[in-house]
């Protein structure tokens, strides 16, 4: 019996994978220009890292983690997000002792036990950036600008960037009381989860997906109206920087991100009503995972959601496909000779292939067409004996006879 892939996972096949490569390459290129370096952390970490780093009251930790015990009876978890792991690596490898800021990016799979649906999988992929060690709002603006530059360069338009400030702990202590006071009269009508959140972390209630809770929090006071002065100033400076960059945004005082670690800046990018990525500042997180006090800001995009958005906007990235050369052979001696020629083409930098099934000349030409070969090299036993081959330019139909010894340099010079 066939064993299928696990629910909520995907095979990324040729034909699609080129789009993935394009998105990933664009991400790397934009990071290179912003002087952001790649970091690769393990796919699994100690469960405690996420409990502490992502937060015990988040959906991720409460419901979505792939946690297992290994043979040494350690509790490990497949990473559900990247930020906690990056701050762990930053601390463990003492990157904080190096000149600040440390600007890092990652691209890779994440794992969450969720109900699979379009744009929501159990293994999905994120492109994320984290900038650690600096609290300057100019960095917040740059990180947001990097995110928007990436999205524009993959070809997306009409995106909505929403920003907010969720305050520092000073602002939040005060705001939590205000929020509890506002919600006390309706506490019993909140969903079970939110009743727990009411005591532990009432700001989470604002992020609840249950309709009654959404309704009950509609008129709740805004964090943005209750910021301490330093937070208010940070937010104002961020807006001014974004204005000076020409990055358009909308202030959404209702936005709270789904993770506990955010402080001050929070932002999301929305395409046709669905969020493709978001992030924010997390000034307490490094300490939370056992490191020194260091500020940080970052974001993560779902690669799948970026690809869905490209589809929705009917963007077809300009991806080079097709072969430089397809080798067609006639006769046994010629057929044998093509293998060494193919190797010569390939090490010289040409994208080259041939037929292995002993197909007819016509079928080989068809295969060359199907693979969008720009040139076809036709080699028969007679030509081989004379030391020549025929080269056909598939765009113009022109044919020429070229000495076998000059084939590679001929192809290289005419394929510029
Ligand atoms: P959502 O509200 O959609 O559950 P989230 O707030 O849980 O998103 P984050 O933790 O902020 O998402 O992750 C950043 C991005 O990663 C999301 O905006 C989305 O593009 C992507 N993402 C998150 N969870 C999934 C998933 N299960 N499948 C695919 N992409 C996901
Ligand atoms: Mg989620």
Image (spheres, helix red, strand yellow):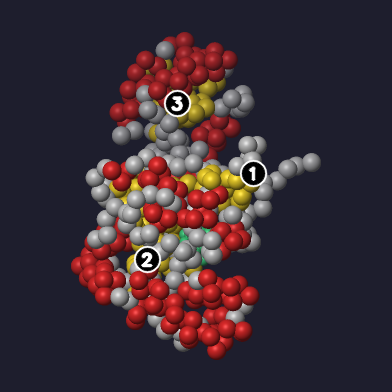
Instruction: Residue at 37% x, 57% y: name it.
Output: 298
User: In which quadrant is the N terminus drawn?
Assistant: top right
Which of 407/130 is in front? 130
Q: Is residue 68 above or below residue 274?
A: above
Task: State the image coordinates of residue 328 (x, y, percent, origin top left).
Answer: 51, 26
Label 2, label 3: how many angstroms apart (C-alpha)?
A: 62 Å
Residue in front for this viewpoint, 314 or 299: 299
The answer to whether any part of residue 163 appears in the image is: no
Q: Secondary structure at mark 2?
A: strand
Q: Is mark 2 within 8 Å of ligand 1?
A: no
Determine the residue positioned at 47% across, 63% down: 259
Locate residue 134, reporting x and y percent: 27, 55
Q: Is residue 196 visible?
A: yes
Residue at mark 2? 263
Of badges 1 and 3, the one in the foreground is 1
Dot 1: few (<14), some (14–19), or many (≥20) neighbours within 10 Å?
few
- Front residue of 195 and 407: 195
User: Which residue does the numbered mark 3 point to in the structure image?
Assistant: 377
* Residue under label 1: 69
Residue 375 location (% of width, % of height): 42, 32
Q: Residue furthest left?
A: 244
């Amino acid at each position: 019996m066939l064993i299928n892939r696990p629910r909520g996972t995907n095979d990324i096949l040729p034909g699609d994978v080129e789009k993935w490569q394009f998105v990933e390459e664009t991400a790397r290129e934009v990071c290179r220009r912003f002087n952001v370096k790649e970091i690769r952390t393990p796919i699994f970490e100690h469960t405690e890292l996420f409990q502490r780093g992502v937060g015990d009251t988040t959906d991720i930790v409460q419901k979505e983690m792939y946690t297992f015990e290994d043979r040494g009876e350690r509790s490990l978890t497949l990473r559900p997000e990247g930020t906690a792991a990056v701050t762990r690596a930053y601390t463990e490898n003492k990157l904080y002792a190096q000149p600040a800021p440390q600007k890092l990016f990652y691209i890779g799979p994440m794992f969450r036990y969720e109900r699979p649906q379009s744009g929501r999988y159990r293994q999905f992929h994120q492109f994320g950036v984290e900038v650690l060690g600096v609290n300057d709002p100019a960095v917040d603006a740059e990180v947001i600008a990097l995110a928007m530059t990436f999205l524009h360069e993959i070809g997306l338009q009409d995106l909505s960037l929403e920003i907010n400030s969720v305050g520092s702990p000073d602002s939040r202590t005060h705001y939590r009381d205000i929020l509890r006071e506002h919600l006390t009269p309706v506490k019993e009508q909140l969903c079970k989860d939110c009743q727990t959140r009411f005591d532990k972390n009432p700001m989470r209630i604002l992020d609840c997906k249950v309709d009654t809770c959404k309704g009950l929090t509609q008129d709740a006071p805004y964090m943005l109206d209750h910021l301490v002065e330093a937070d208010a100033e940070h937010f104002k400076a961020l807006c001014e920087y974004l204005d000076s960059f020409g990055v358009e945004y909308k202030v959404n005082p209702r936005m709270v991100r789904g993770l506990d670690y955010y402080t001050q800046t929070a932002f999301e990018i929305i395409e046709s009503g669905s969020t493709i990525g978001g992030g924010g500042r997390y000034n307490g997180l490094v300490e939370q995972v056992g490191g020194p006090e260091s500020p940080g800001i970052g974001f993560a995009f779902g690669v799948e959601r970026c690809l869905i958005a490209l589809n929705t906007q009917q963007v077809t990235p300009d991806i080079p496909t097709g072969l430089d050369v397809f080798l067609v052979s006639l006769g046994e001696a010629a057929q044998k000779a093509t293998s060494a020629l193919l190797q010569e083409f390939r090490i010289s930098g040409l994208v080259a292939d041939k037929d292995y099934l002993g197909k007819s000349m016509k079928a080989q030409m068809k295969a060359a067409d199907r693979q969008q070969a720009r040139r076809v090299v036709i080699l028969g036993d007679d030509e081989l004996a004379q030391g020549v081959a025929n080269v056909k330019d598939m765009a113009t139909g022109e044919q020429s006879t070229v000495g076998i010894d000059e084939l590679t340099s001929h192809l290289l010079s005419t394929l510029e």
